[in-house]
Image (spheres, helix red, strand yellow):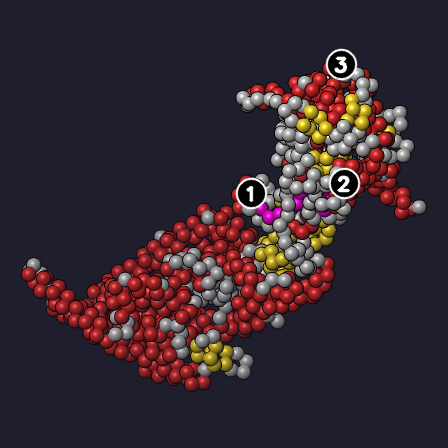
Amino acid sequence: MSVTKVLFNMRLKTMMVLAAIAGVVIALRLIDIQILRHNAYLQMAERNRTQVLYQTAPRGRVFTSDGIEVASNAPAFSLYYLGGKQDSAYLTRLATDFAPSLRVSQEELEHALQVGAASGKTVLLAENLSTKSTVALQELQYYYPGIYLIEETKRHYPYGIFASHLLGYLGNMDEREWRKRNNKLGYRLTSKIGKNGIEKKYEQELKGKDGGVFLEVDYRGRVKSIIEDKKWAAGSDVYLTLDFAVQQAAEEGLKNSLTGRGAAVAIDPRTGAVLALASAPAYDPNIFVPYIDEEQPASKKISEYNLALQGIYPPASTFKVITAAAALESGLIDPARKVTCTGKYNSGPRIFKCWGTHGPVDFLEGMSHSCDVYFYSVASQIGAAAIERVQRMFMFGRPTGIDLPGEKAGNLYGPTRRARNKTYWFIGDTLNLSIGQGELLVTPIKLAQFAAALASRGNIYRPYYVEKIVSNQTGSVRQIGHTEILQHADLKPETYDMLFKALKYTVDNGTARRAKLKGFDVYGKTGTAQNPHGEDHGWFMAFAARPGEEPAIAVAVFVEFGQSGSAAAGPIAHDMLKAYFDNPHRVLAPKTQDDYNELLAGEENA
Amino acid sequence: MPSLKQLAAGRSRMDFILLGAMLALVILGALCIMSAVNSISWTNPVVRTHFVALPIGLLAFFIGKSFNYQIYDEQWKALYVFILLLLVGVLLFGSYQRGSRSWFVLPFFSMQPSEICRVATILMSAAFLDRRGRRIRDVTSVFYLCILLLPIFGLIMLQPDFSSVVVTLPSIIILLYCTGINVFYLWLIALLAGVAGFFTVSWTYIYLHPELLEYPLVRIFNELAHNGWYIAGFAAIIILLGYLAWWLFRQFRIYLPSFYFVLATLVVLAGLFGGMFVDHQMKPHQRKRVEAFLAPRSDPQGAGYNILQAQIAMGAGGIMGKGLFSGTQSRLGFVPERHTDFILAVVGEELGLWGTLCVLGLYFIILWRIIAVAYASGDRYGYLVCAGIFGMFFTYMLINYGMLIGIVPVAGIPLPFISYGGSNLVASLWALGVVQSVYGRRLRA
């Protein structure tokens, strides 16, 4: 064998060894990619080909106790871009065609599209589209692969401002909330969550399980097939204790009142259930979930200030009930004894005025005319400590304990409190206290609780407004609200009898005449809180019963700067009581959704 | 494993192992192409063209096998002229498609002459080297061969068809290696390519990252591509360094011929100019490819997208694969160029690791058999031809697999027998026909 041949063979062998080494390296890397990293790559491939169009589940509805749906769902459409590799000319064309119907600028839309094209992920271009513009969009979607229109639902409040402070509203999650909720399944960055009221408090129950369409798409985002269509599951329904008619009467009344600012609360004195909780000014929660292709609300600024819970004012003459109770309880006062009102009361160092000149008045007349002089005289007889004791019995200066955020406690006023603060108590303070002026402060709901406590002869309830939550999936009922007595104001029965008599007398013959309701026993007391900073505030407190029955409703109405309790607040209370007893919905009063549906079906058949 | 000698023994006119591996690849390729374009219908242009090209390719194989391979040795000048004519012809009459003028469009079919030229160039180079006789291992042979090949590469670059150069150049180097040439010269060539590549890649990197120009050294380096003074200065430094090295070796009493140092210096300078030439020729999309190779994940939707999607496809296939016509990555178009350059991704996704290893194995069998034929060949020319063709298939395999597994930049090179591409198929089959011809005539030559 020649030298050349040996050299050739060596070189051939070297080449073969090189090829073998290359082959082994390639094979090892293939094993790495196809076995060791198989799962990761498989996931990436699945992500590539599947796009998910989420469908927001309808939120649970909210019903009043008389079966009116006050928060429901309306159809809304969402426009998605499925991503995929598209050239920018296509995206520009798409943006130009779609921007007008979506009410966004072309640049914004194009940017969103480019993000989708770059990430290869679905982009929500627009949500909450109304049915009107979808006709045009349906047509366009056939010309542009990768664009997909799906039907969803959006929150709708059919009665606008109805109980808006209680219902709350929806909004987008901020980053912190998103991180908090992200680990719980079912929340996407675009998910709307409850921002206030019931929407926030029962977010978990109201929010259903979102559905989704899993699509197979090609590299341009064109839909090839539907892999899975997962149906959504609607959220649970919330049933309130509110009485639709009473709440509406309260809101109407406040809206049409002198200043349009105030609060009205109605409580069932048998259970503590809130029948109405109105606070003005209110807002329309619909503005937070508008159809984006329709006229946008000018401003989304709202007043979340819930006057019924957060407004603290002197209770004024309505407080005379406490003074009266203290007087009756003390046994020092003969109700028949007359005090002559000359319009002035001389306490020694100072002269206190009455709002009128009532002449000689006994207990009933003193209450019915709300005569200050009578109560000055009574208070100076029984002393401020006795009044403070009854205040404490009715839990003044403490929040009502309703399950709503931000409730103010108000302020208890009396010598003990004063002593604790290491200042002095003067006779003038006693007189001020007796007519509910001075440092004494209450919220409207507190006064309603007090009215209910009187009506139930001493039971101070924790007010509740959510009756139950009914699952739409399993039909299971979760009872939320229940009667809870916080304290019993243990006054003598005779005291209550006398107070009832006096309050009824006030409605029948006195300052609270406005609340008179034919055929019903109405008990009430007005109040006009002196306001050194402006017009006086008007108060009205009442409860009512069908003849021979227990009182069924207790209300407290407050009109800020209303000038007069009887003129401003009285009519509202009257309307609320009337609405309660005449409520046409209550006749239906279905207890469950099934009953309600049955009823509707029956009507249709008829 | 039997020795090469035993395998080459026997009296058969046909290497059936090579033939079997080739046919297996062709059949697998046809299946994969149909799967890649997701069609088994005659109406699909890709499927139709492939099945028209197949018989032509088989014909080319039999022509290659039947003709005595020594014809190419005899007629090497005619072959050379034929190559030049084809390349000039395509520049004059070719059709301009996708940025290059490399296609003859004829009434019923199109062909890519550079594919045929690739094999012809190897045959011609082997003939030239064989005719150098005893001087085959001289450095002059390399030099003359370079001069001979320069017009061919020049014409190909005018199209431009980089992939042809990328495959032919390594084939020629492997051919040179197998002539038994002093490895030093090959190192020089590698150095040349290395220097040229280094400059090109660096300039490209700077081009794509202009913010780097804030550093003065980088700016000076970048200026080397354009500014004559800088180039002259750099050349002077290199010459000085070469002289210094020679002088240093002498000081340590290591006596090497000064010729080596002169050559090394010249090669570095040639590398610089080569790098400059390539840099000036490069188009933006080619720069992007280099970028994608340097950092494939930096721009997943741009240049790196292709390779990432191909790897996703392969990885998703796993061991068993998803089955033919069932790969989502290829069927839904995420893998780009899935029936040509990235056909292996389709194989990987649909036939899994078995598929990719099977193709690799069949390629390895082909390479091994070509070596065996080279070993058994009756004359030096047969040996050289086999070495060149081995180099060609080895390069194809290396680049195509390397591209997929991310060790070689995306070069747009098909995988012979598997990828769609009529001209490539015909040329590759012809090359294997020539190898069979060498085998068949091993005893007579």
Q: Nearer the viewer, residue B200 or A21?
A: B200
Q: Which residues are magenta?
A: A161-173
Q: Of callouts 3 and 2, which one flags the residue occurring earlier in the amino acid sequence?
A: 3
Q: Tell me if residue A70 can be seen.
A: no
Q: Residues within 10 Å of mark 1 (few under 14, many from 20)?
A: few
Mark 1 touches mark 3? (CB < 8 Å): no
- Kindly indicate whether the residues beneath marks 1 and 3 are on one polypeptide chain: yes
Q: Residues within 10 Å of mark 3 (few under 14, many from 20)?
A: few
- Kindly indicate whether the residues beneath marks 3 and 2 are on one polypeptide chain: yes
Chain to which the residue tagged by mark 3 belongs: A
Residue drawn at x 76%, y 14% as measured from the top left: A331
Residue named by callout 1: A177
Residue B316, position in %: x, y?
A: 51, 52
Say if B184 sits above or below A398 in the image: below
Residue A579, position in %: x, y?
A: 83, 38
A212 displayed left or right of B158:
right
Say if A552 sits above or below A35 in the image: above
Q: Nearer the viewer, residue A118 or A104?
A: A104
Q: Secondary structure at mark 1?
A: helix
Q: Residues within 10 Å of mark 2 (few under 14, many from 20)?
A: many
Q: CA distance from mark 1 to mark 3?
A: 59 Å
Residue named by callout 3: A331
Residue drawn at x 58%, y 40% as measured from the top left: A184
Residue named by callout 2: A568
- Kindly indicate whether the residues beneath marks 1 and 2 are on one polypeptide chain: yes
Foreground tag (1 vs 2):
2
Q: Secondary structure at mark 2?
A: helix
Chain to which the residue tagged by mark 1 belongs: A
- Quadrant in the picture for residue A137: bottom right
B189 displayed left or right of A328:
left
> Is A486 inside the magenta-drawn segment?
no
Q: Of callouts 1 and 2, which one flags the residue occurring earlier in the amino acid sequence?
A: 1
